[in-house]
Image (cartoon, rainbow, N blue to C red):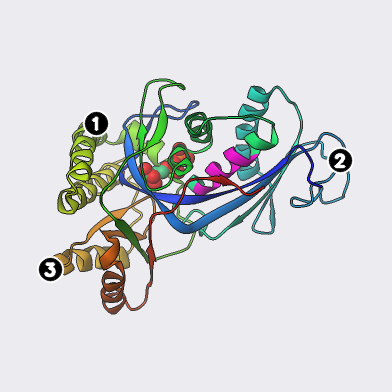
Amino acid sequence: MLSPYCATACAHANIALIKYWGKADESLVIPTTSSLSLTLDGLTTQTTVEFHADDESCEQAGASATGSPLLHDTLNIDGQEQIGTPLQRVSKFLDVIRERAGIALPARVVSHNTVPFGAGLASSASAFAALAAAASRAAGLELSDRELSRIARRGSGSACRSIYGGLVKWNAGHDDESSYAEPVESPLDLAIIVVLISAKEKPMSSREAMRLTVRTSPLYPAWVCASEVDMRDALAAVSHSDLRALGAVAEANALGMHAAMMSARPGVVYWLPQTVAALAAVRDMRTQGFDVWFTMDAGANVKVLALASEAEHVADELRNRMPDCAVEVHHPGSGVRIVH
Ligand code: DP6
């Protein structure tokens, strides 16, 4: 029998076509701009949360390392006990759920990932989406998807989009209630091909880098203005099934975000030599007739947008051109779900 205070949830990463980069409100995680993303298959986080009412232990999560009742939250990621910043961030997030549920119990959190941590592959999106769903269920909360997206947002902004499958819009809003994600109907059958340039943890977290960009980059206000127009263009492209228009605006939006972060003081540069090679390969493939566009997040890796029906062919061509890099095809994935 599982404890009534225990639940497990599974979520997938998402890749933004129109990016979230910068917060208008740091503590509530209200973004400066709306964003649009595709939730992917694979790139998964499965998380079990157990709130400890007494010394009862959850079969999935296990009790504390000593087997005794927990006095504070504990966090295990892929077999490694976490302390310091990752644990503090999870505890702070659990406080939001505890407050909402009216409980004051410590939690054991155990998480398994197929996403390399902190490599710009949206690990925080799948992580906080799974954590939000598991923790709120374990705390006895019955939330709508929209409410869950608002809660996941408090852990990591991009996580609010992983509550839903497929194409998802995060409405920036102006307060906790108006800042939520929702699914977008798409007639386009899209895929993302990930060119893995580096699985190493990035030199600066996206949270830190976006803060620095908002505070110091002279180009940031221009990107915010452009992003509003980009979102309108992207949604129009989706509704007209116009892959070329969608790809062009996604590529421009990502380059604008990187231009803004590179012009922060000091500049944030995630690109590696192989990153530039991959961007050039994608553009050259376009001249050869491939319908492909790139996007990048806070890391060196390159993601390529294509039609699902052409994804394997595109991946083979990228493998030929980038023989030292792993190239993986990802199709749209489902939203977060409770496993048990
Ligand atoms: C470049 O969601 O990781 O991937 O809210 O501070 O946790 P925090 O940031 P996070 O930022 C993601 C930034 C991005 C673009 C995107 O996913 O929209």
What type is the residue that disc 2 sits on? Answer: Pro
Q: Is mark 3 within 8 Å of ligand 1?
A: no
Is 24 drawn above or below residue 36 in the view shown? above
What type is the residue that disc 3 sits on? Answer: Gly
Tags 3 and 2 touching, CB below 8 Å? no
Residue at 21% in and 42% down: 239
- Residue 280, can we see it? yes
Task: Specify start and end residues of the magenta stretch as a single range.
Answer: 126-134
Q: Position of residue 310 (x, y in %)?
A: 25, 67
- Which of the 4 quarters of the picture holds residue 18? top left
Q: Position of residue 315 (x, y in %)?
A: 31, 71
**Going by the image, does 255 lie left or right of 98?**
left
Q: Pick whichever of labels 3 and 2 is earlier in the sequence.
A: 2
Q: Nearer the viewer, residue 142 or 32?
A: 142
Label 1, label 3: how far apart the Cα atoms are: 35 Å
Residue at 73% in and 25% down: 103
Look at the numbered disc 1 and give the secondary structure of its residue. Answer: helix
- Which of the 4 quarters of the picture holds residue 99? top right
> Which residue lies under the disc numbered 2?
69
